[in-house]
Amino acid sequence: MTLIPNDQRIHTVSADVDTRNRKSALLNSNVESVTMADITQTVSEDGPIKYYIAYYQSTNPGAWDVREIYNTTGITFTWSRVGDELKATPSEELFDYFGGKWTSLSVDPSMTAFAGAPSTVGLDMDYADIRNDGAVGDAIFVGRAKIDATGTITQESGIENVLVLKRIINTDAPQQSGN
C-alpha cells in the first residue's frame, strides 16, 4: 500500500490523460503518481482511530432500542437496561494501556434548559460514562439526569440520543520506565 506523505499535493486528471513523465530525471524523482485507491487505502478503517456510533432510546417502564449505526472498533456490544439507564457490555476490555488502546465516548453535548416557575427552572442532561461493572469489567452506561433549581439531581426515565465511542489504537504504546 502506498502511503501518501502529509506534505504532498495531489493533482488529479482523467484516466484517459497521458501521464508519462517528460521532465528531467531530477524533477521526475520528486513526482509520484497516486490513484484514488491509494487515497482510499491511506484513510481506510485500518487507521489508528476506531469508531462505534449507536442511536439509543428508552422509556422506563417501556421499550428500549439501540441501533448500531457504524462500528470499526472490532468490539461487539451487548445492550441491556439497568434501572433508568442503558448498559453496553463490550466483548473485550475498552482500555488496554500497555497494548496502547484507549477509549473515549460522548453523547450529543447539548443540554436543554426547561423553563417554568422559578422552582422548576433547571437542566436536562444526557450522559454516557464508562464504569467498572464488577466481574464483567468496564461497561458503558447512558442515561439522562435532571438537575432542578435547587441542585437536586434525579434520573430521567425517557432518553434518546446518539452515542459516539472513539477508540484510539497506538501501535507504538509508551512503555513504563524508570526506577
Image (spheres, helix red, strand yellow):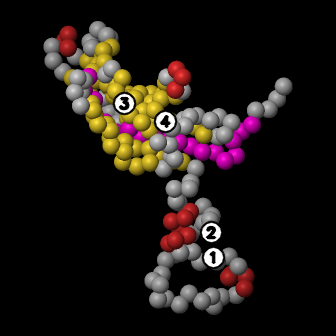
Residue 2: mark: 2
Could you tell me how far apart the alpha carbons at marks 3 and 2 are, in whole angstroms?
Answer: 43 Å
- Depth check, mark 4 against mark 2: the one in front is 4
Residue closest to the eye, 99 or 35: 99
Q: Residue at x 49, y 88 (%)?
A: 17
Mark 1 or 2, nearer chain start: 2
Residue 120 shown in magenta: no
Could you tell me how far apart the alpha carbons at marks 4 and 2 are, in whole angstroms?
Answer: 34 Å
Q: Amino acid at mark 3?
A: Ser
- Depth check, mark 3 against mark 2: the one in front is 3
Residue 90: mark: 4
Residue 162 shown in magenta: yes
Could you tell me how far apart the alpha carbons at marks 4 and 1 are, in whole angstroms?
Answer: 43 Å
Residue 5 percent location from the top left of the image: 63, 64
- Depth check, mark 3 against mark 1: the one in front is 3
Dot 1: element: loop
Residue 80: mark: 3
- Quadrant of the rendered image containing residue 106: top left
Dot 3: element: strand
Mark 3 or 1, nearer chain start: 1
Mark 4 or 3, nearer chain start: 3
What segment is highlighted magenta in the picture?
Answer: 157-175
Mark 3 or 2, nearer chain start: 2
Dot 2: element: loop
Left or right: 114, with 5 as reference point? left
Residue closest to the eye, 53 or 9: 53
Q: Which residue is tagged 1?
A: 32
Residue closest to the eye, 170 or 72: 72
